[in-house]
Amino acid sequence: MMLAPIDRLSLLSSAQADALRARLVEVAYDERAIARGESIAPGLFDALRLPLVHDALSLDDAPASDLALLFAYMGRVSLERFERALTPALSALALELGLVTRGDDGSVASPFLLMPFMGLWIISDPLSQDGDAVMGPGPTTHELARLLPARTPRSVLDVGCGAGTFALLAADRGSAEAVGVDINPRAVELARINARLNGLSAEFLAGDLFAPVEGRRFDLVISQPPFVARAPEVDAAVFLHGGTYGDELALSLIARCPRVLLPTGRALMLLDAPVRPGAPLHLRLREALGDAPVDVAVFSTPGMSPDLMAVGYTARSLESLEGYAATVRRYRHHLRALGVTEFSHAIVLLLPPGGRFSISLPVRSLSALDGEAIERWCDAIDLASRDPDTLLAATVRPAPGLVFAEERATPDRSVEPTWRVRSERGVAVSRELSEASWALLEAIATQETVAGAVEVYAELCGASAEDVREQVLGFVREHLAKGLLAWERGGASG
Ligand SMILES: C[S@@+](CC[C@H](N)C(=O)[O-])C[C@H]1O[C@@H](n2cnc3c(N)ncnc32)[C@H](O)[C@@H]1O
């Protein structure tokens, strides 16, 4: 299918954009309007549930449901209802700009998606199209956006910006320098249109990875690169395919990332990576980064099986069952030939000026993480790398979401208890603790400083503080790095 032309869309003026935005706010075309559609047959691929979503939204009288039908679910709406939703003047503008087109029966449809996203509206291409289609916000965009720091960094670089989503979000939250780069010139053009649509100032540049920003440095680099394994004979899509295994482009992006980071900057990326036995992602990243002075953390969740991946990759572009069987088999054969048996769905965090850590942190799902959890872990790593005196003066607590339980097999006290730590959010953990670890964690959790915990623990062991200090410091550093302990900055050491 041909991509819709964007030359007329780029004629949208700032005044027209302001009027359009005001109307979208007025009729509440926001994420709640999309949630109505998403609540119908959730979890199924769009190709299977779209007829139901169309049906439900067309029976709903709210103007926002007409806009959702048209702009989020590629449905058709009568001109009358479209004019009621957008006003006759703005409907005429949408037709003039090619944002919607009229069919033979007089109804309107849109060749674009126009999605509400965290207070913004983003125009992009439907992903049923291959080639140069431009990706807008989807479920994985949401997963990564939730991890943005609450305090907006001054400068943000969105690599592979697609429709410009992360750069525009940063600009909206007050970043003075919000830049997006993409190899696809159509993406850059659409991102600029989206900047105007949202009344935001951001810079969008075309080129390969960091080439367009050579010599510049940023506080935050954010990216969701294409990470799908491309099977032979499957049409290439620039927003989707990341190489034969899928993770090649992401690895090369991450390897080059340190040179665009400010000394206190960070990089945050989302990708699916095939699990390669004996070569976990965090070690492959460390190797790709060489001796670049950054710490690497991979928050990884179990991804889908190769069979489900094959279905997902294929169903994305599924408008009918025609061609499904051939394509799904191509993906499946490709993944089997590569020997991929498992995927990991991961967030990669790079932190300069490290070089000390390369760590893999299991999480049950990315929804267990948020910007605050990432921030807390960065603080923990910061403390773990400080000198012993700073560590001894710090207040350290079990990370929020951890549950420590003393478990007894019988109600009487005849059987020795076991101690277990498990997490209800954040880093996934469920393991038995030795009696010594339990006692030490209790001392850390109740004493104002780590030095206090050293004293208490020494007394319990019948040893001197000097004798146990190194052991306690090693324990604290390790558990800070694993996300089980958190630095309470407001504590004794401030
Ligand atoms: C998965 S999409 C992400 C879009 C958007 N950032 C989001 O998260 O919704 C990946 C984007 O990377 C772009 N891309 C692919 N190869 C690239 C390269 N070598 N350099 C820069 N961008 C690239 C694609 O054009 C596409 O827009």
Image (cartoon, grey):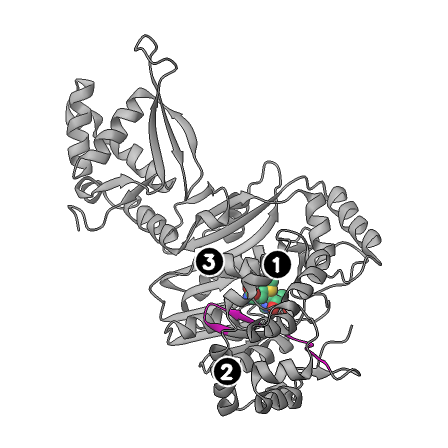
Q: Disc 1 marks which residue?
A: 249
* Placement of 361 over or under 178, stated as above or below: above
Q: Disc 2 marks which residue?
A: 23
Question: How far apart are the two marked residues, 2 and 1, measured between alpha carbons?
Answer: 40 Å
Q: Quadrant of residue 399?
A: top left
* Residue contact between numbered discs 3 and 1, judged by CB atoms under 8 Å: no
What type is the residue that disc 1 sits on? Leu
Going 69% across and 60% down the picture, which residue do you hit? 52
Q: Magenta residues?
A: 107-120
| Label 1 lies in ligand 1 vicinity (Cβ under 8 Å) | yes
* Placement of 264 over or under 285, stated as above or below: below
Report whether residue 34 is seen. Answer: yes
Asked which secondary structure carries label 3, the reply is strand
How packed is label 2: few (under 14 Cα within 10 Å), some, or many (20 or more)? Answer: some
Question: How far apart are the two marked residues, 3 and 1, measured between alpha carbons?
Answer: 15 Å
| Label 2 lies in ligand 1 vicinity (Cβ under 8 Å) | no
What type is the residue that disc 3 sits on? Leu
Q: Quadrant of residue 413?
A: top left
What type is the residue that disc 2 sits on? Arg
Report whether residue 207 is seen. Answer: no
Q: Disc 3 marks which residue?
A: 268
Q: Quadrant of the N terminus?
A: bottom right
Going 30% across and 32% down the picture, which residue do you hit? 475
- Residue 459 lies in the magenta-colored region: no
How packed is label 1: few (under 14 Cα within 10 Å), some, or many (20 or more)? Answer: some
Between 114 and 169, the one lying in front of the other is: 114
Question: How far apart are the two marked residues, 2 and 3, measured between alpha carbons?
Answer: 34 Å
